[in-house]
Amino acid sequence: MAAKAKGFTLIESIIAILVLGISMSVLLTILFPRVENSASSQYQVRASILAQSMMTEILARGFDDNSDPNGGIFRCDEDDTTNCTTAMQAESGETPATYNDVDDYVGCWHTNNSSECSFGVTVKGNLNDIFGSDISSDYRNFRVEVSVVYDPDSRFGFTDSLNRYKKITLTVFAGKYGEYNFRAYRGNY
């Protein structure tokens, strides 16, 4: 009496290898790229939180260095005696603690481990100086570039040449996870 053979036949082994190969190719093309991008949404949220904090800090300041913070009779550019500033930068000697208008923040702000800025953008300093605490461990490799420009009033229904609005653009760079743009307007009121 012959003993019954145990194990896999050659055909069964080949079919098993083919099934494993197909399933691995499906995993490699569909599932694994998703795992690689799983941190992207976390970086988007962190970038928006950083931008919201930075924008709140900027919008809490006055419209212009020549604006009266105590609610004077005339705003800058509204009469012939007080013109709005043309240079969008901090006045000499100002520090983040003494910034008083939105264009003082123009430039590149970074954390301790990310001091590289875009070409032509002035390095302003560390984000820690703005927020007053060390955020470099929470925002490793993040940087924020701020630009402020006068915005044409025609879209808002004004046809005169007064500088009524400044457009503030924040670009948050989140390392290899991309850059995120945020915009706000500050009115001359």
Image (cartoon, grey):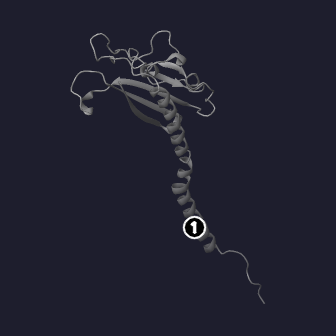
> In the depicted view, which residue is nearer to us: 184 or 22?
184
Residue drawn at x 42%, y 20% is 103
Q: Count the marks: how many?
A: 1
Mark 1 is on which residue type? Val
Q: Which residue is mark 1?
A: 19
Q: Position of residue 144 (x, y in %)?
A: 49, 28
The image shows residue 42 at horizontal and vertical percentages of 55, 43
Q: Which of the 4 image quarters holds residue 71?
A: top left
Up-down relation of residue 38 to residue 101 (above or below): below
Which of the pair 159/138 is nearer the observer?
Answer: 159
Residue at 38%, 14% in the rendered image: 66
Provide residue 35's location: percent of width, then percent of height. 57, 50
Comparing 48 with 184, the one in front is 184
Residue at the far left: name it.
159
- Residue 91 lies, in percent from the top left, at 45, 12
Neighbour tally class for label 1: few under 14, some 14-19, many 20 plus, Cα within 10 Å:
few
Quadrant location, the C terminus: top left
| For residue 48, side relative to residue 183 (left or right) | right
Q: Residue at x 66, y 75 (%)?
A: 9
Name the residue: 44% across, 30% down. Answer: 170
Could you tell whether 86 is left or right of 51 in the image? left
